Amino acid sequence: MKLNVVFFLVLLAAVIFSCNTKPVQGDWITGTETEQLNTAEKHFRGLDVAMMEIGHRYQELYWAGQDENWEYATYQLDKIKLSLTHAIERRPLRKESGDYFLQNDLPLMYSAVQKGDTAIFNESFRIFTISCNACHTKEKVPFFHVNKPVVRTSVISK
């Protein structure tokens, strides 16, 4: 009897949960499962979209350092790391440059932030910016020249 009740409850739960699944919204993603994945992958794009996020976080990082908001600066570095890690996973041709940045340049910036000294931060940020531009040159996009932010667009401040 107990076994029948347990079986009935498991079966009932399975039916309820399967009825509550909603179909994908919209008609834009069609085709086989593989074709749908290819379409979704296309929408993620390559490094260009990731670099938009990284550029935004680069600016936030700079202003966090100027404000001595070290927790926010660390947060921005974490997000730069995450975004670049995902981007080079999607675009393995950029892996060598991305890995170099993640393993060499980013840790130096983390170290500067952990010291909590604006002068050290500013010097490290200057070197960080040079590293960004060196990577762009290596990847044949030297016209993506990064400069230290001048105008604050962030609404976050300490």
Image: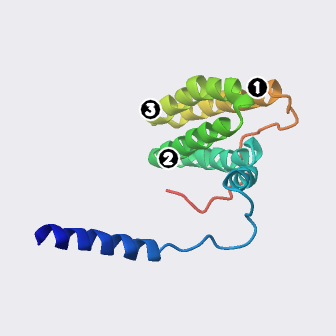
- What number of labels is visible? 3
Where is residue 21? Give x, y as percent.
Answer: 49, 72
> Closer to the camera, 6 or 67?
6
Which quarter shows the N terminus? bottom left
- In the displayed structure, 19 sits above or below 104; it is below
Q: Nearer the viewer, mark 2 or mark 3?
A: 2
| Circle 2 crowding by C-alpha within 10 Å: few under 14, some 14–19, many from 20 | some
Task: Residue lying at the far left in this picture: please name it.
Answer: 1
> Closer to the camera, 72 or 157?
72
The residue that mark 3 highlights is: 115
> Closer to the camera, 2 or 99?
2
Residue at the spot 76% in from the left edge and 68% down from the top edge: 28
* Residue 35 placement, left or right of 22: right
Task: Identify which amino acid the numbered label 3 is placed on.
Answer: Lys
Inter-mark Cα distance, 2 to 1: 24 Å
The residue that mark 1 highlights is: 134
Where is residue 74? Give x, y as percent.
Answer: 49, 42
The residue that mark 2 highlights is: 75
Inter-mark Cα distance, 1 to 3: 25 Å
Residue at the spot 59% in from the left edge and 29% down from the top edge: 102
Inter-mark Cα distance, 2 to 3: 15 Å
* Residue 70 placement, left or right of 95: left
Where is residue 19? Give x, y as percent.
Answer: 45, 77
Q: Could you tell me which secondary element the residue under label 1 belongs to?
A: helix
Residue at the spot 72% in from the left edge and 32% down from the top edge: 132
Question: What label sits on residue 27 in the rendered view?
Answer: none
